[in-house]
Image: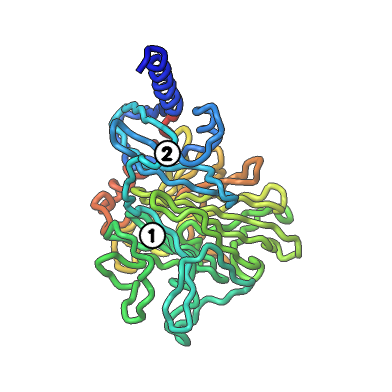
Amino acid sequence: MNFRKSILLVSLSFLGITTLKAQNVSLKLSNDLSEERKDELIVLKRAFLEKKFKKKIDGRISVTEGNQPVFVQFDDLNKDGIWDEMAFLQNFKSLEKKQLLLSFETAGDAKIKPLTRAYVRQKRRLADNTFGLNLDKDSVPANQPNTDFKKQKLPAMLTEGPAWENDKVGFRLYMDIRNQKDIWGKRTSKMVLDYVGTNTGDSYHELSDWGMDILIVGKSLSAGGIAVSVPLHGRDTLVRLGGANMGKIVYEKVADGPVRAIFRMHYPEWNILGDGKLASLTEEISIWGGQYFFESKVTLKGAPKKTQLVTGIVNLSAKQSHEFFNKKVAAVYSYDVQTENKDKLGMAVSMPKKYWAKFGKIGDEGVDIKNSYTAYEKLNKNNSAKFRFHVGWELSDNTFKTIDGFKNYIAKQAGLEANPIKVK
């Protein structure tokens, strides 16, 4: 090999190395709290990443911590065939700062077998009384009746509507005229909601190894059900998202784990006041691994001016509610023997303080809504608000065996919510 060719090969090799390095960027994460944090959801938007890499992204991004690859979920939120966000979970020690490496994914990158920690499903009953594939979209017409189990043993939809879970807790929505949310108390980290409710001889109202349906909702706002408060004739009128005026319901799956699950419930023809003036509401629900809550973002368009979002907690068995505030978060919670299994259960609604308006209570005197602790939220300039619904069942975790344990959990979660992991 002559000298000139040797110089050329060295130069090309050097260029290859510098080009490769140019494709790598560091991601700095910081926990500013003097406490440990487990399973923090880190979400990176495509626009943020393109600024980091200083170029358009074609393909996926790999993440490594030290020499260990991190499993990343890529989510196409607007269904245009291009992922919009990447999400992964991270643990942090007290005041820990981390530096992760981001790079363009290549065929030779180490592949991680994912552990499913979040799941959402909507399934329809087939002619042979089994339940079909997990649907991406589904809908029911206005006035969809709830299942009459005296006439049929299995509902048209598995557990009567969409269900979502993580490795800690599960929920479901009655996709019918009731439009209420229910809680699956879990004693296992496995995803169980594909088979719960498929066997009529195995009642989910009785305690099993996996857990059970633990809530009785009555005519309450259930477990984070939706209503609005509307100014009418000089006074506020509370209207549930349900009943004859709700209109049709559309379910849309957005992301189905294994890190986080996201789905949207659309109500495009809500006749709030029964006067023919239609509003549209979309609730986007997210759940991710390691947490005892789901997060809800509600967007309401076409409602009367000064309308407020209202959510709540069933209080059929709770003796009182408790409130918690820090500088950025407001929360209301109950704790009592209030499950179908006569166990202790804590439930809470928390929200950013900028949305919070007030907390209240409805007893048996209510008409359309009864027996609820209520949380009122102001809508922002985009007609949106958000909240989290928390569950602490004593059979899920010993932390929830006492009211002090649940209170401490709420205080810690409010602190984490007020001080998110810093990402740069």
From what the image shows, is residue 276 above or below residue 58?
Answer: below
Which three-letter amino acid code belongs to the residue tagged 1?
Gly
Q: Secondary structure at mark 1?
A: strand
Q: Secondary structure at mark 2?
A: loop
Which three-letter amino acid code belongs to the residue tagged 2?
Glu
Dot 2 or dot 1: first in sequence order is 2
Residue at 32 percent of width and 33 percent of height:
65
x%, y% of residue 318? 38, 59
x%, y% of residue 320? 40, 54
From what the image shows, is residue 328 above or below residue 77?
Answer: above
From what the image shows, is residue 55 above or below residue 74?
Answer: above
Q: Quadrant of the C terminus?
A: top left
Horizontal side, residue 255 vs residue 39: left or right: right
Q: Quadrant of the N terminus?
A: top left
Identify the mark at residue 170; answer none if there is no mark: 1
Residue at 47 percent of width and 79 percent of height:
126
Residue at 47 percent of width and 63 percent of height:
181
From this viewpoint, is residue 277 visible?
yes
Which quarter of the figure has residue 111? top left
From this viewpoint, is residue 353 visible?
no
Q: Work out how far the residue at label 2 is from the one at label 1, CA to CA, in angstroms.
A: 33 Å
Dot 2 corresponds to which residue?
A: 105
In the depicted view, which residue is nearer to us: 16 or 101?
16
Bin the neighbour count of mark 1 within 10 Å (Cα to Cα): few under 14, some 14-19, many 20 and up: many
The residue most toward the front is 2
